[in-house]
Image (cartoon, rainbow, N blue to C red):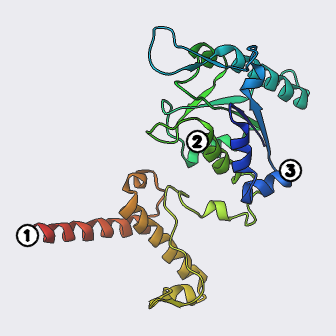
Amino acid sequence: MDFHVLTLFPEMVSGGLNTSIIGRAIDKGLISLNTINIRDFSKDKHNRVDDYPYGGGAGMVIQAEPVYLAYNHLAGQIQEKTANQDKKKPRVIYVTPQGPVFDQKKAQELSEEEDLIFLCGHYEGIDERVLEMIVTDYISIGDYVLTGGELPAMVMIDAIARLIPGVLNNEVSSEFESLHDNLLEYPQYTRPEVFCGRSVPEILLSGHHANIEAWRREQAIKRTYERRPDLLPGANLTKKEQEYLNRLVEQNGQKEGQKTK
């Protein structure tokens, strides 16, 4: 997969992603990262890309033209790479708190694309006209405001890239971590067996893989119930697992009842 980022701060994006697992995946050619500086497409002699908003108001707005020119330049590169004039246009993701919140399901969907373009805003945003012309997806990483779209773009690229085959050393690890089946990940342990008086659960030392997997599944359900119960309606539970969840809910209800007495 090829990731492309339209940004005012390309060094921020490349510096943050060319490390660790994602950096190694780039080195191996499993994914690529292409950063395009929007300022390079400004026709202003000082490479200025922002101006005052029509109608007044605080802050500055990124102009439509440099964004549009940068996008067209990139789209042409992608078209040449594919050598297929009938190929659909790549998805352009505008990083904004105005879009639906990014989640694992969206990461999985986007990981199936060949090219993804991330458009990073700054200041008070980008001229609406160019957004209407090029953006296909408006996506947020949460209900808060950051100084720019670079960090959210990097978050999404990291989440998407690790779903690309070969990026993770352990091919099955992405299937059994947090948010698999809408459940949080079960607790993990490593050596030593006892640390500060706390022991590793005995079942993990038993060598009985079926029992271990069943325990881990129950722990994932319990942790999700305690920390992110909002995820449970979308969880894929067996009848036995649903019964286990029902017992947790019942036990919690009894505890709450005792507190109010």
- Going by the image, does 156 lie left or right of 146? right
Q: Residues within 10 Å of mark 1 (few under 14, many from 20)?
A: few
Q: Nearer the viewer, residue 70 or 102?
A: 70
**Rendered view: 153 above or below 72:** below
Q: Quadrant of residue 84?
A: top right
**Rendered view: 153 above or below 138:** below
Identify the secondary structure beneath mark 3. loop
Residue 72 placement (x, y as % from top left): 78, 19
- Rendered residue at 66%/50% (across/down): 158
- The residue pinned by badge 1 equals 261
Residue 177 placement (x, y as % from top left): 58, 63
Identify the secondary structure beneath mark 1. loop
Residue 97 placement (x, y as % from top left): 49, 33
Residue 166 visible in rendering: no
Q: Nearer the viewer, residue 169 or 233?
A: 169
Camera-nearest label, 2 or 3: 2
- Going by the image, does 8 lie left or right of 23? left
Q: Which mark is residue 29?
A: 3
Q: Quadrant of residue 213?
A: bottom right
Residue 248 placement (x, y as % from top left): 32, 69
Q: CA distance from mark 2 to mark 3?
A: 23 Å
Q: CA distance from mark 3 to mark 1?
A: 63 Å
Q: Amino acid at mark 1?
A: Lys
- The residue pinned by badge 2 equals 152
Q: Amino acid at mark 2?
A: Pro
Q: Residues within 10 Å of mark 3 (few under 14, many from 20)?
A: few
- Going by the image, does 94 lie left or right of 26? left
- Rendered residue at 58%/21% (across/down): 126
Q: CA distance from mark 2 to mark 1?
A: 46 Å
Camera-nearest label, 2 or 1: 2
- Going by the image, does 255 lie left or right of 42? left
